[in-house]
């Protein structure tokens, strides 16, 4: 019986010796993970083309903003993680960027900043306490233009979304506070809505919204 056990043990050790090798092979897969630290949540190929962009606005308190892409593909979402990976905590409107972009579920998103040139940036006017919401409260609703559009996306947790207008113009920003005034808490993608829209330095913004009949 002892001989039998002694005979089986080397075979078990021989089988176990394969395990570190298999773990080593499995462990080789996470080699791609370091790329995610450079770009935030998205992975951008190293050979992704570089695109120039101009900052439209960025709110460091909320941790996001938008930049207009020079290739004509529209605006790209810019998360603070991408800025911080490039050594910045904020960036002013008008600043020129060189970026890499990926196509997220909600549209273009800047995943890597390669260059930031703030020589063309425009310093924003000082804001009173209340932050970005102050500009929404002072918007002149009497100048709002009635429009109809379709919800592209709305994230209740983030507190904002965008609506594609039937006029074919740029998307309309929708803040959660506007929904609250209409007795709504969220809007599903594809929902048809009617809204009052005003032009702001940051683009078109809805000041009223209702479900379209």
Image (cartoon, rainbow, N blue to C red):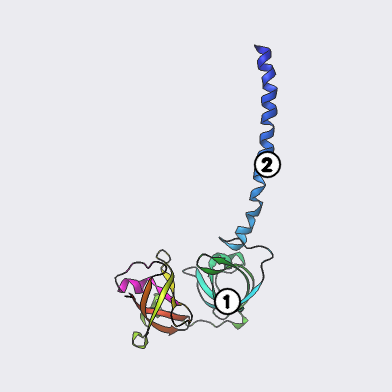
Q: Mark 2 falls on what kind of element?
A: helix
Q: Nearer the viewer, residue 124 or 191?
A: 191
Disc 1 target residue:
73
Q: In the rendered view, would you say 33 is above or below 19? A: below
How many numbered marks have been drawn onto this rendered protein structure?
2
Q: Quadrant of the N terminus?
A: top right
Q: In the rendered view, would you say 14 is above or below 64? A: above
* Left or right: residue 75 compared with residue 18: left
Q: Of discs 1 and 2, which sits in the foreground?
A: 1
Give the quadrant of residue 9.
top right
Q: Residue furthest left?
A: 183
Q: In the rendered view, would you say 156 is above or below 73? A: above
Kindly identify the residue that appears in the image at 44 percent across and 81 percent down. 204
Magenta stretch contains residue 38: no
Magenta stretch contains residue 186: yes
Give the image location of residue 118, x and y in percent: 61, 79
Give the image location of residue 149, x and y in percent: 41, 77
* Left or right: residue 146 compared with residue 124: left
Q: Which mark is residue 24?
A: 2
Residue 119 visible within the image = yes
Q: Which mark is residue 6?
A: none
Q: Which residues are magenta?
A: 172-188
Q: Nearer the viewer, residue 8 or 60?
A: 8
Residue 131 visible within the image = no
């Amino acid at each position: 019986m002892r001989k039998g056990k002694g005979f089986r043990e080397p075979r078990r050790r021989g089988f176990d010796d394969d395990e570190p090798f298999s773990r080593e092979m499995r462990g080789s897969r996470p080699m791609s993970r370091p790329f995610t630290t450079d770009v935030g949540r998205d992975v951008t190929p190293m050979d992704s083309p570089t695109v120039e962009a101009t900052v439209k606005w960025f709110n460091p308190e909320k941790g996001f903003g938008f930049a207009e892409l020079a290739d004509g593909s529209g605006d790209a979402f810019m998360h603070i993680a991408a800025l911080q990976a490039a050594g910045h905590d904020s960036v002013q409107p008008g600043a020129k960027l060189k970026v890499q972009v990926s196509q997220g579920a909600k549209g273009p998103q800047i995943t890597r900043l390669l260059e930031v040139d703030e020589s063309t940036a425009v310093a924003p006017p000082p804001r009173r306490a209340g932050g970005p919401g102050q500009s929404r409260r002072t918007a002149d609703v009497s100048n709002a233009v009635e429009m109809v559009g379709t919800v592209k996306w709305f994230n209740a947790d983030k507190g904002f979304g965008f609506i594609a207008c039937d006029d074919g113009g740029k998307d309309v920003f929708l803040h959660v506070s506007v929904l609250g005034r209409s007795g709504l808490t969220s809007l599903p993608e594809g929902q048809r809505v009617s809204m009052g829209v005003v032009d702001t330095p940051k683009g078109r913004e809805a000041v009223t919204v209702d479900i379209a009949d």
